[in-house]
Amino acid sequence: MQIKRFLLCAASFGLIATPNMAIASSPPIVLAQFQGEEQTSINVYQAASPAVVTIRAGRGSGSGSIISAEGLILTNEHVIRDSGNGQVTVRTPNGRSYTGAVIATDRRNDLALVRLLNTQGERFPTIPLANADGIRVGQQVFAIGSPFGLSGTLTRGILSRIGRDGDLQTDASLNPGNSGGPLLNSRGELIGVNKAILSPDGRSNSGIGFATSATIARDFITQNANRPVPSGAVARQPTPSSPAQRSSTPNSPRLGVTVDGRNLTVLEVEPGSVAATIGLRRGDRIVAINQRRLTGVGDLQTFLDSRPNSALLTVSRNNRLANVRVRF
């Protein structure tokens, strides 16, 4: 870029310094107005980009969408996973930085809500969520985020597929840092929360990206938008019977974990608990007890209520299974 600038300056100097050169007058050049798809891209970017933020948690960073004027942000759970005390740093497009508190997460759908703190009543630009009729395979889609830390980056593609689980597939270019940012339709509505790419070898980008649908995100927001800011810890999305994993019925053994009620993924481990002693950690999934596969949180609760003295847990970690003996 510096070389190009130097050559342009040099060429301009030559024209100015050359004597006796006649410069013919010519009519002014009239540039055509932006049209069609080009104008649509410009409109979407101008409408949505002021509400797309960069989020930093620990040593990692991602993106997010402001969805309420009071400063509620929708992003990925994996973007805020390393927030430690439940707080993240949020940078808005105008260059201002805020502290954000994680108020809810949904690991299964990779969603999280962050509330901006100490905003002094400031009102923020927002991105509206699309309804189901605004999400159609074949439509143009736009992704805005901070790939490799380059905030405010726009890419474009189409909505290639809607999976059975509701996940959206797109060929819009997504890269590290786009996670948590919006996938938008041509009306500037959020149709998905960008979260992953398909990488056959774990290194290269195949050009296929995925987002959690706005229809799933809307339910998550409705359930959690009014949750208070937690003090010093990440608040988890409530799931049916989830408190039972931490404290069973009176005199029942306590495993000392909070799990996702749908897939038994460990969300929290109590310090000093049985689970902590055997080395369970966040992200592990409890698959079976005494070689009997668990079909849900009810199976785990029923077993604990039987007041066993010990158990053989089958745990999945990083796609590997291990059996661990637990003594209560």
Image (spheres, rainbow, N blue to C red):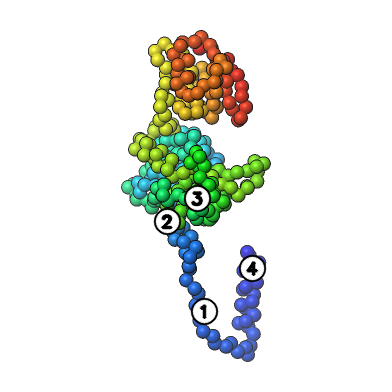
Measuring 42% from the left and 29% from the top, which residue is drawn there?
A: 239
N-term-proximal mark, 2 vs 1: 1
> Can you identify the residue that label 3 sits on?
137
Distance between mark 4 and mark 1 Cα atoms: 23 Å
Q: Secondary structure at mark 3?
A: loop
Measuring 49% from the left and 54% from the top, which residue is drawn there?
A: 139
Q: Nearer the viewer, residue 100 or 177?
A: 177
Q: Is residue 66 left or right of residue 284?
A: left
N-term-proximal mark, 4 vs 1: 4
Distance between mark 2 and mark 4 Cα atoms: 38 Å
- Mark toward the viewer: 4 or 3: 3
Q: Position of residue 246 (x, y in %)?
A: 44, 21
> Can you identify the residue that label 4 sits on?
4
- Mark toward the viewer: 3 or 1: 3
- Rendered position, 244 above or below 195: above
> Can you identify the residue that label 1 sits on?
29
N-term-proximal mark, 3 vs 1: 1
Q: Which numbered marker is on residue 269?
A: none
- Mark toward the viewer: 4 or 1: 1
Q: Position of residue 302 (x, y in %)?
A: 45, 16
> Can you identify the residue that label 2 sits on?
187
Q: Are marks 2 and 1 in contact (CB under 8 Å)?
A: no
Q: Position of residue 120 (x, y in %)?
A: 34, 47
Task: Please state, as top left, top right, bottom left or bottom right, where the N terminus lies in the image.
Answer: bottom right
Q: Secondary structure at mark 1?
A: loop
Distance between mark 2 and mark 1 Cα atoms: 32 Å
Measuring 67% from the left and 41% from the top, which residue is drawn there?
A: 201
